[in-house]
Amino acid sequence: VRPNNYSTFYDDHRQNWSIMFESEKAAVDFCKQVCIAKCNSSPALDSVLCQDLLLGEGQAVEGGDSLEVAYTGWLFQNNGLGQVFDSNVNKDKLLRLKLGSGKVIKGWEEGMLGMKKGGRRFLIIPPAWAYGAQGVAGRVPPDSTLVFEVEVRRVKLAKECSGSDGLSVSSRDSPAPSPVPSSDGFSSD
């Protein structure tokens, strides 16, 4: 995925190709289909499949960072997107999570690493990385492969310390001071 509705890929001869799409929606839909095709061509899905839809900006998130996320989750059924089982997209409240805390399924912990603020990613998560044999009563059948579209709306880096000038800066050598946190601990933008 590249800015301005471009995507690049390598074919099986390692030749690089670029495609420009008419709209962001067309580029995003194509990327989702590529990820679904990867899943369907795997003999056994044993890890999380990730496909960036939009790259976002700023620092890549890592373990310990706090995020606010908008998401939609589908069951993977009949080799494609099945029924939506959970979403907060049309709700007022974003999901808050701290990567690496174990409060969300393992597939999210793995699949969201490296995302940036404003980034969107498509995740296909095998049962072992999701709810496994127990499922979720009334919502997720046992041994279900799940599909999520996640968007990182806000980020708070875990490694913040006070610089000698008194400004809060990221210990990951951020070129500029971090924005002043609002009362909830997330940056005001």
Image (cartoon, rainbow, N blue to C red):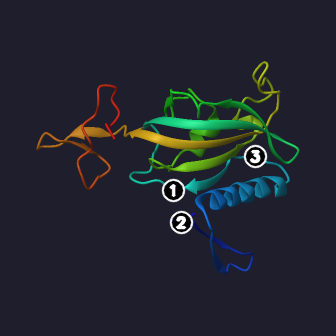
Mark-to-mark CA distance, 1 and 3: 25 Å
The residue positioned 59% from the left and 49% from the top of the image is: 121
The spot of residue 33 in percent (x, y) is 74, 57
Residue 115 visible? The answer is yes
The 10 Å Cα crowd at callout 3, few under 14, some 14 to 19, many 20 or more, is few
- Point out residue 157 in the picture as x, y percentages from the top left corner: 37, 40
Q: Which residue is mark 2?
A: 2
Label 1 sits on a secondary structure element that is loop
Q: Name the outermost residue toward the front.
A: 22
Disc 2 and disc 1: Cα gap in Å? 7 Å
Q: Which mark, by number, is residue 46?
A: 3
User: What residue is drawn where x is 85% and y is 53%?
Assistant: 43
User: Residues at badges 2 and 1 in contact (C-beta under 8 Å)?
Assistant: yes
Q: State which tag comes first along the sequence, 2 or 3.
A: 2
Q: Which mark is residue 55?
A: 1
**Amino acid type of the residue that numbered disc 1 sits on in the rendered structure:** Leu
Give the percent coordinates (x, y) of residue 170. 29, 45
Crowd class of label 1 (few under 14; some 14 to 19; many from 20; radius 10 Å): some
Where residue 188 sits, quadrant-wise, is top left
Residue 57 placed where, x, y %? Answer: 42, 54
Front one among 95 and 110: 95
Amino acid identity at mark 2: Arg
